[in-house]
Amino acid sequence: MSETMPQMCSLLDQQCMPCRGSVPPLKAKALDYFRKQLGEGWNLVGEHHIEKEFTRKDWREAVEFTNRIADLADREGHHPDILLTYGKVKVTLWTHKIDGLSENDFILAAKIDPLAR
C-alpha cells in the first residue's frame, strides 16, 4: 500500500493486508489507477472513500447480499460501512486507520462486485 504503482496483478487475486497506519492514503495517480480496475458504479468521493449502491429485488435479497459481503469482509480482515435498506445495499470503503483510501479498499471493492451477480 504505497503511492508508487503496484505490481500488475488483478485486485481479485490479492488479499487485504493489515494496515499499520504509518502508510499515507493513496492520492491522484494511484487512486485513478485502482479506480479504473473496478467495475461500474464505484464512485470516488473526494480522495477519501469509494462507494457503490447495489439494488436488490426486496428486503430478503438485500439482507442476503449484505451477509455475503460481511462474510467476505471477515475473510479479508477489512470491513466496509454498509447501509441496508429495502432493496438496496450501499457499501462505503476507506481505511479508517489512515483516514483515507488504501489498496485494501479497492481489493475488497473488486471482490464485492462478483457477489452481486
Image (tube, grey):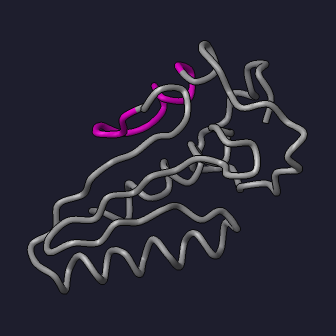
Number of numbered discs visible in the structure rendering = 0
The vertical placement of 33 against 9, above or below, is above
Which residue is situated farthest in the top direction here? 29
Is residue 74 within the magenta segment?
Answer: no
The N terminus - image quarter: top right
Depth check, front residue: 61 or 79: 79
In the rendered image, residue 87, in percent from the top left (x then y), is placed at 14, 71
At 31% from the left and 83% from the top, the residue drawn is: 64
Quarter holding the C terminus is bottom left
Apparent side of residue 85 relative to residue 7 in the rendered image (left or right): left
Q: Residue furthest front?
A: 99
Residue at the image point whose x is 75% and y is 28% from the top: 7
| x and y, in percent, of residue 26 in the image | 68, 27
Residue 33 among those drawn in magenta:
yes
Range covered by the magenta-colored residues: 32-43
Quadrant of the rendered structure where residue 102 is? top right
Image quadrant in which you'd find residue 15: bottom right
Q: Where residue 48 appears, x then y in whole percent?
A: 55, 34
Q: Is residue 30 left or right of residue 56?
A: right
The residue under the point 9% across, 72% down is 57
Q: Is residue 113 above or below residue 2?
A: below
| Residue 78 point in image, percent of width and height | 65, 62
> Residue at position x 29%, y 82% from top?
63
Q: Residue placed farthest to the bottom in the image?
A: 60
Q: Is residue 63 above or below residue 43?
A: below
Q: Is residue 7 left or right of residue 79?
A: right
